[in-house]
Amino acid sequence: MILRLAAVVLLALGSIPAAAQQVESEAPSVAIEGEAPAAGPLRVTVTDVSAWQDLGIAIPAFATPANASTPAHLDGTGALGQELARVITADLRNNGLFRPIGPDALPRPPFPEITSPAWSTWDSRGTEMLVHGFVRAERDGRLTVGCYLYDIALTEELVREGWVVQPADWRRAAHKCADLIYSRLSGESPFFDSKIAYIAETGPKDNRIKRLAIMDSDGANHRFITNGQATALTPRYSPDYQSIVYLSYLNGNPRIYIYDIGTGQQRLVAQNNNPTFAPRWSPDGRWILYSMAVGGNTDIYRVPASGGQSERLTDTPGIDVGGSYSPDGSRIVFESDRSGSQQVYVMNADGSNQRRITFFGGRSATPEWSPRGDQVAFTHISGSFRVAVMSPDGRNLRHLTDSWQDEAPTWAPNGRIIQFFRTTRNSGETSLWQVDLTGRNERRLPTPVGASDPAWGPVLP
Amino acid sequence: MPRILIATLLAGSCALAGCASKAPKELPEQPVSVTPQGQATGTPGSGGAERTIIPGSNADFLQQLRGRNVIFFDTDKFDIDSADSASLRAQAEWLLRYPSKRATIEGHCDERGTRDYNIALGERRANAAKNYLVSLGIDAGRLATVSHGKERPVALGSNEQAWSQNRRAATITID
């Protein structure tokens, strides 16, 4: 069950937070400007992030008008304010974004300064930006969290926003604040307030247990969904996060199931006796693409997510597999070995106009269309397995990783970061990694056990 | 566990015979004559104190086939070569002898492929074996296939010798 954040409009500059009147919107969206990034003064291209990567950002503890008890933290809203700033700092630092300085190295601003920073405290610390915020427990138990971004040199507020959350969702308020900072300074769309489904792996290589698991984009709120009795593979979050489509060997054979996160129930996507695998959602969540082998021949099908008749989209001898919709849902990028080896093809959503786009040498597999539409990420197999990106017309190949076996890229909701999994030679141990589009900022994601098949969901409303 | 046992035996033979691009060209003799203990280890469902092998059981199948219940493939390939067809003929012989028995053919791949594709490729290999058995007179209705892609390796290294043993289709009869 995903609780929506109610948007709060923090009122005019100068009013202290305690006096701010919250206006709760019924709309699922937050009170942020449209995603058009043009307004950002620091917008740069992805290949030159240095202009804003070096920005120092001071993120002191969030203030609270009065320390109040909350289920979100044993020591009340005062201590929670410190945690909020830590989560924001970790979001930015772990993704190689900016130069954040967290609350443990900074003085703690008192509540009245949140909307009126004490500039002299902040202008000699070598940071250009300042984040202030507050957290307040409401009578109904919910938390109001306000987030303010200031330009220290200009002594000006750049942006502010607030959210009302259930105590259990307090980390989401921190991610929303990190998203607000990131979006305002980079001109890019947000991505922190999102979740990841993946496969947790334990046990030796010849007896590996594979379980469906989910976590927040920063690894918090980790949860195993399946118990490991049946091998689970290749999950994908539905665009509304209500369900996960994945492959399970539940009855001994590979079949695609839709797991409902709210009810814990699952159902087969296609009712027949053939193996079905490689499931993918359409961007609007109405369709599921899948692959089905009949007599050894694999083709791509689509079926309404609500159930119904499947429609075959490819019809060639060989293996047509995978598939990923363009963001507008009009086209599908997929993988086929009809030419003799795995290569990437594009077709219209109805299966028409199929054409090959990869001519790089080696094999090209697991294409995933960027949520921005401008790139396709895929696995390039040429000796090693490397995560690469290209234009949807197959031009502009760029390798982002260089390891023995990296595969299965999945996009951050803003199309600026890619996660994938890495397999270690011989041991077969797997781990989740992410890399930005420059290829320079690569890092391992912390997971409790081995991990593969990541699938990054959209930004939560 | 029968598959693992067999693969271990094959691995040893591979080192002796010298490995070609395609795993075990020559099927090895078992290093020891088949004893009741040996069969029992490799045979689920054959338990019981006497450890006798019931004719027509999977244990019997494995004993008769002496490793030929598994066939091997080249990288990214699923064609049946002469060694494979010899193995499949032996499998068909047994299946013709026990016409009430059903079998499952498991298709597998090495780790050097992407996951989804390997599920498709494993299915293709299992089907190639199935179709060959059908061409030898086995009723298709007796033969099921399942692909495990790259999920169930028997050889654990990351080298060509291990991969050649993992690119396989293994026939298991159903007791």
Image (spheres, rainbow, N blue to C red):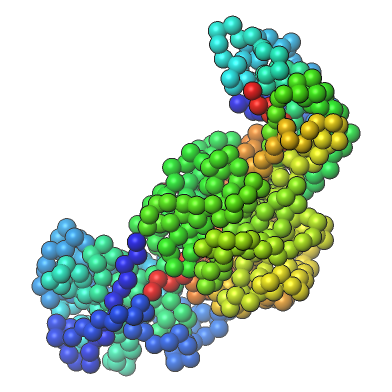
Residue found farthest to the front: A308
Instruction: Tell me: residue A380, above or below residue B165.
Output: below
Q: Quadrant of the C terminus of chain A?
A: bottom left
Where is residue A389? Give x, y as percent: 64, 70
Asked where in the image residue A251 lies, by quadrant, the reply is top right
Q: Quadrant of the N terminus of chain A?
A: bottom left
Q: How many marks?
A: 0
Q: Quick one: B131 or A450, which is closer to the camera?
A: B131
Whether residue A280 can be seen here: no
Asked where in the image residue B27 lies, by quadrant, the reply is top right
Where is residue A101? Give x, y as percent: 32, 72
Whether residue A196 can be seen here: yes
Q: Quick one: B81 or B104, which is closer to the camera?
A: B104
Task: Tell me what residue is drawn at x 45 percent, y 85 percent.
Answer: A35
Where is residue A289? Give x, y as percent: 61, 63
Q: Is residue A361 left or right of residue A232?
A: right
Task: Tell me what residue is drawn at x 29 percent, y 90 percent.
Answer: A157
Q: Is residue A346 left or right of residue A57?
A: right
Task: Tell me what residue is drawn at x 70 percent, y 37 percent.
Answer: B144
Instruction: Tell me: residue A251, above or below residue B38.
Output: below
Q: Quick one: B104 or A39, which is closer to the camera?
A: B104
Task: Tell me what residue is drawn at x 59 percent, y 54 percent.
Answer: A270
